[in-house]
Image (spheres, rainbow, N blue to C red):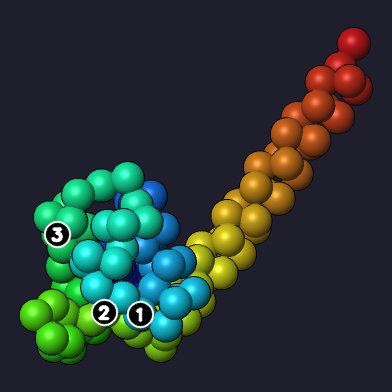
């Protein structure tokens, strides 16, 4: 079953880049992320809120800010879901291909 909130969070390219940075750096703050992204600190904070609500990130106080880290279990869940979707679409496309080939073969056999 697809988790829409999870995929809505991952669907945004800025949030995907943030996840990449958080994973590469072992975590970060809104300020540290905004220094590396073409968006304001306020926008970064909003994106981090979306990631946190989706369960992809967790935060803890760190001085005057909050430090965010990626929930690797939740991210692995997303990867598993993506694999399932990929498998489903591969099967569907193979079925469509077989139908198209059968139609083509039938059309070639008609006078």
Residue 59 image point, x, y percent? 20, 83
Residue, disc 2: 68
| Location of residue 7 in the rendering, given as x and y in whole percent from the top left corner | 33, 61
The earlier-in-sequence mark between 2 and 1 is 1
Mark 2 and 3 residues: CB-CB less than 8 Å, in contact? no
Q: Give the total number of marks visible in the rendering.
A: 3
Label 3 element class: helix
Above or below residue 107? Residue 96 is below
The N terminus - image quarter: bottom left
Residue at image coords 81%, 27%: 104
Q: Which of marks 2 and 3 is nearer the N terminus?
A: 3
- Left or right side of 61 for 30: right
Name the residue nearer the viewer: 38 or 110. Answer: 38
Residue 50 as seen in the image, left or right of residue 13: left
Q: Can residue 5 be seen in this view?
A: no
Q: Which mark is residue 46?
A: 3
Estimate the spatial distance between the alpha carbons at disc 2 and disc 1, rounded to whole Å.
Answer: 5 Å
Q: Which residue is drawn at 17% across and 73% down?
A: 53
Vertical placement of 69 versus 39: above or below? below
> Mark 2 and 1 residues: CB-CB less than 8 Å, in contact?
yes
Residue that numbered label 1 is attached to: 27
Crowding around mark 1 (Cα neighbors within 10 Å: few <14, some 14 to 19, many 20+) is: many
The C terminus appears in which quarter of the rendering? top right
Q: Position of residue 39 (x, y in %)?
A: 25, 47
From the viewer's side, name the closer residue of 39 and 4: 39
Find numbered disc 2 in the image and state the secondary structure of the residue it sits on: strand
Which label number is shown at residue 107? none
Residue in the foreground of this view, choosing between 22 and 92: 22
| Image point (20%, 75%), residue name | 52
């Amino acid at each position: 079953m697809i988790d829409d909130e999870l995929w809505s969070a991952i669907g945004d390219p800025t949030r995907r880049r943030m996840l990449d940075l958080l994973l590469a750096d072992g975590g970060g703050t809104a300020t540290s992320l905004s220094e590396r992204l073409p968006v304001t600190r306020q926008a970064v904070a909003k994106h981090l809120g979306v990631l946190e609500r989706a369960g992809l990130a967790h935060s803890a106080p760190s001085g005057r800010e909050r430090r965010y880290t990626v929930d690797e279990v939740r991210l692995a869940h997303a990867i598993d879901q993506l694999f399932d979707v990929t498998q489903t679409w591969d099967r569907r496309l193979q079925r469509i291909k077989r139908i198209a080939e059968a139609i083509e073969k039938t059309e070639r056999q008609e006078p």
